[in-house]
Image: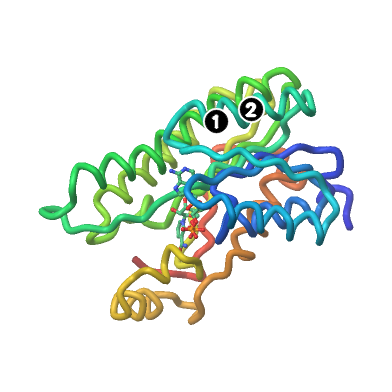
Amino acid sequence: MSDELSLAGRVAVVTGASRGIGAAIADNLAAHGASLILSAFSNHAVLEQTRDEIVSRHGVTVDLVIGDIADPATSAALAKLAFSKYRRLDIWVNNAGVLLDGLIGMISDADIQATLGTNLAGVLHGTQAAARLMQRAKSGSIINIASIIGRFGNSGQLAYGASKAGVIGATMSAAKELAPSNIRVNAIAPGFIDTDMVRQLPEAKFAERMKSISMNRIGTPQDIANAALFLASDLSTYVTGQTLGVDGGMVI
Ligand code: NAP
């Protein structure tokens, strides 16, 4: 393993880590030696199973925080645990998200609030909690999981597109503010990735999205986890404020 990819001795928080992209990112960071603090909200058993699998595969320490990421108390609890247990925080991945599609005339206020609360406010609170702790060591990497929809928009994704465009804007603002403290902030914009989130789509919509991928295959959570590893590691020490598309040449 190259030294620049080693995360031995580093501490990483990953939100929405029970399954899908978050679980793959957590697994990849652990594979490279990071200690983990993971969170999710509604399904404790799945998060515990993911933790057990990561521990048995990689032998790293993994702690869990259960909580709604829309509530600032969840990010505060994650940072508090990192500080009390390790006195350090190196990597924070804002990954938790929901997809609640709806045409403009149909989307409910509850769905708008849930989308903005989880996908955008959750990232803002996570960034605050991470930055406060990373400022102590004047080092760290914050990685925000945005979406291709936040860059180009999509029919039926008014709130989701707004939340993810907001994540990209927040990434650039935080990068500018935190660069003097040597804290990097970058986003990944996945295209169409094979997780529970997209398997809930109606068959026709799923097929339509598949046709828009130039590389002719759905993305895997590992594709995103590889990009996250780059942004978490010392291979990217001079990269900040960027949004890295990982979409197989998808056209929206
Ligand atoms: P997923 O399989 O549905 O997993 C979502 C994760 O977020 C789960 O661990 C879930 O845990 C957690 N979560 C959801 N709401 C939460 C809340 N209020 N508080 C705390 N945790 C919460 O989704 P995914 O496809 O892996 O997506 C991960 C990220 O990638 C999201 O931000 C998504 O928008 C983004 N993304 C995905 C795709 C794609 O094609 N899959 C494309 C672009 C961007 P619980 O259910 O236990 O709460």
Q: Tell me residue 94's x, y (percent).
A: 54, 42
User: From the viewer's perspective, is residue 198 above or below residue 125?
Assistant: below
Q: Quadrant of the N terminus?
A: bottom right
Q: Residue at x 89, y 49 (%)?
A: 3
**Which quarter of the figure has residue 239?**
top right
Left or right of 49? Residue 113 is left
Q: Residue at x 73, y 60 (%)?
A: 53
- Asked if the residues shown at circle 2 and circle 1 are in contact, with their CB atoms under 8 angstroms apart, the answer is yes
Q: Is mark 1 within 8 Å of ligand 1?
A: no
The amino acid type, in three-letter code, at marker 2 is: Ala
Q: Tell me residue 120's x, y (percent).
A: 40, 38
Extreme-top residue of the structure: 136
User: From the viewer's perspective, is residue 59 above or below residue 199?
Assistant: above
Left or right of 208? Residue 13 is right
Q: Quadrant of the C terminus?
A: bottom left
Q: Tell me residue 230's x, y (percent).
A: 70, 51
The amino acid type, in three-letter code, at marker 1 is: Ser
Which residue is under mark 1?
A: 75
Quick one: SS at disc 1? helix
Left or right of 185? Residue 69 is left
Image mark for residue 32: none
Image mark for residue 79: 2
Q: Residue at x 23, y 60 (%)?
A: 156
Camera-nearest residue between 56 and 122: 56
Quick one: SS at disc 2? helix
